[in-house]
Image: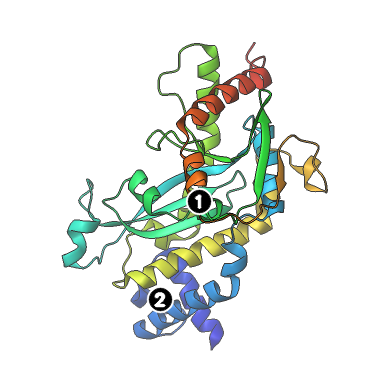
Amino acid sequence: SPLQKCTAALRMLAYGCAADAVDEYPRLEESTTLSCLSNFTEGVIQLFGDEYLRRPTPEDLQRLLDVGEVRGFPGMIGSIDCMHWEWKNCPTAWKGQYTRGSGKPTIVLEAVASQDLWIWHAFFGLPGTLNDINVLDRSPVFDDILQGRAPKVKFKVNNHTYRMAYYLTDGIYPNWSTFIQSIPLPQGPKAELFAERQESTRKDVERAFGVLQLRFAIVKNPGLLWDKEKIGKIMRTCVILHNMIVENERHGYAQINTSEFESGESSRSSKVTSRESIQAGDMLGMRREVRDQEKHARLKADLMENIWQKFGDEDE
């Protein structure tokens, strides 16, 4: 029955067991169980992918900006990082391409997560030899901005106006205007407070990876399938189901109270408006704006001052 088949697929996703370890409970053969998993992942992606793997809408962006402002980072819309999933049955001919320092082949997932652990961007399938910068060069994370499809964002930090939202990252990412890293060796109380706040806020994406692996042990355990396309569908399915659970439970484990700006118009300084379509020549200008290192340095200094003004008295 369909119930038996869905149960077999969910047991493989949730417990990470092999196909022939499921046969006693749903009473299905190994080949049937693998077929059920393949059909289940395709069905979930087809039915729910558009909603639960969507880019942030203007309403979503406004909520993310409001939450970022409460946490001391106006204009922040999430944290970005990469995770490696071990691929046990990687074909021998590909092992050199997929194997890095651990000695085991892995596949990379690049993700953007917000404080409620919703995964807004999932880019999966690149070889494990690539580091975060190589993955970023191939990633579509900024495609909407470069092609003019993303809504406009406007926010003020330390009385300076900015028009490009940003992500929190770890130290490997480049100094672009869309990335804010921590300070490796902070000197002075302002830098120390900024580093502490940035590193604690950036842990959102690490928490999202941990929760994803705990909910779906198939992502935590080494991948047992041979077909890379099917492995990609499994990862997308797990992200979709994870976002479904987040939508249902987000009020239970949100770290801050967001009720004050969830209903209707926000009184905060960060605003989202629709973007007019841009010409092909403007894409180079947008690309330069995304990679502007001077704007990055100015924004980082303004954020440091803003966090000191907002949280500097708490330790005294």
Q: Which quarter of the rendered picture does the C terminus lie within?
A: top right
User: What residue do we see at 62% from left, 23% from top?
Assistant: 307
Which x, y percent locates residue 84? 35, 52
Query: On the image, numbered disc 1 is attached to which residue?
Result: 283
In the picture shown, does residue 256 fall above or below 278? Answer: above
Note whether residue 63 is visible.
yes
Residue at 43% x, 52% y is 110
Above or below for 103 versus 199 = below
Report the side of 95 relative to 181 (left or right): left
Q: Position of residue 162 (x, y in %)?
A: 63, 34
**Residues marked 2 and 1 touching at CB (< 8 Å):** no
Q: Nearer the viewer, residue 56 or 312?
A: 56
Q: Which circle's residue, 2 or 1, is located before the other in the chain?
A: 2
What amino acid is at disc 1?
A: Met
- The amino acid on which the numbered mark 2 sits, given as a three-letter code, is Val
Label 1 crowd bin: few (<14), some (14–19), many (20+), radius 10 Å: some
Q: CA distance from mark 2 to mark 1?
A: 51 Å
Q: Residues within 10 Å of mark 2 (few under 14, many from 20)?
A: many
Name the residue beneath numbered marker 2. Answer: 22
Res 23 visible: no
**177 to 137, vertically: above or below:** above
The answer to which image quadrant residue 279 occupies is bottom right
Give the residue at x 48% y 44%: 80
Q: How are the residues colored? A: rainbow
